[in-house]
Amino acid sequence: MREAGYVTMLDPLRIKYGRIMAGLLFIPALMGEVFYSAAILKALGATLTVVLNLDKQISIIVSACIGIFYTFFGGLYSVAYTDIVQLICIFVGLWIT
């Protein structure tokens, strides 16, 4: 895909089937991202509810603000560093277990 110069996964489909089909295929991808983001925010909110004893809706809003804040100011590097921290936590947790 890199050699062909594609930017997204839909680029080869757009070239083969046209712009209208690529536009239609974008809808399930968009819905998947929206529902995935909602599930992650709900999980983070549930965690904050248990840990900090906050209201569930406030916890979800706080989780969204934290995610937006560190991504906005840190860019993709902050997201990559968060993944590294999560992997370390998983490794330590599995080792303890």
Image: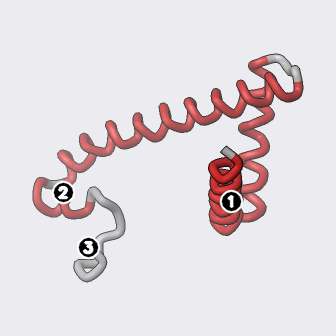
Residue 75 shows in the view: no
Q: Earlier in the sequence, mark 1 or mark 3?
A: 3
10 Å neighbourhood of mark 1: few (<14), some, or many (≥20)?
Answer: few
Quadrant where the N terminus sits is bottom left
Residue 59 quadrant: top right
Whole-number angstrom distance, CA of label 1 to CA of label 2:
38 Å
> Dot 1 lies on which element?
helix
Q: Is residue 91 above or below residue 3?
A: above
Q: Which residue is mark 3?
A: 1
Q: Which amino acid type is marked by label 2?
A: Leu
In terms of secondary structure, where does tag 2 sit? helix
Q: Residue furthest top?
A: 55
Which amino acid does the dot numbered 3 rest on?
Met
Viewer-side label of 3, 2: 3
Sequence-wise first label, 3 or 2? 3
Residue pointed to by mark 2: 13
Q: Quadrant of the C terminus?
A: top right
Which residue is at 32% across, 45% downward? 26
Residue 40: mark: none
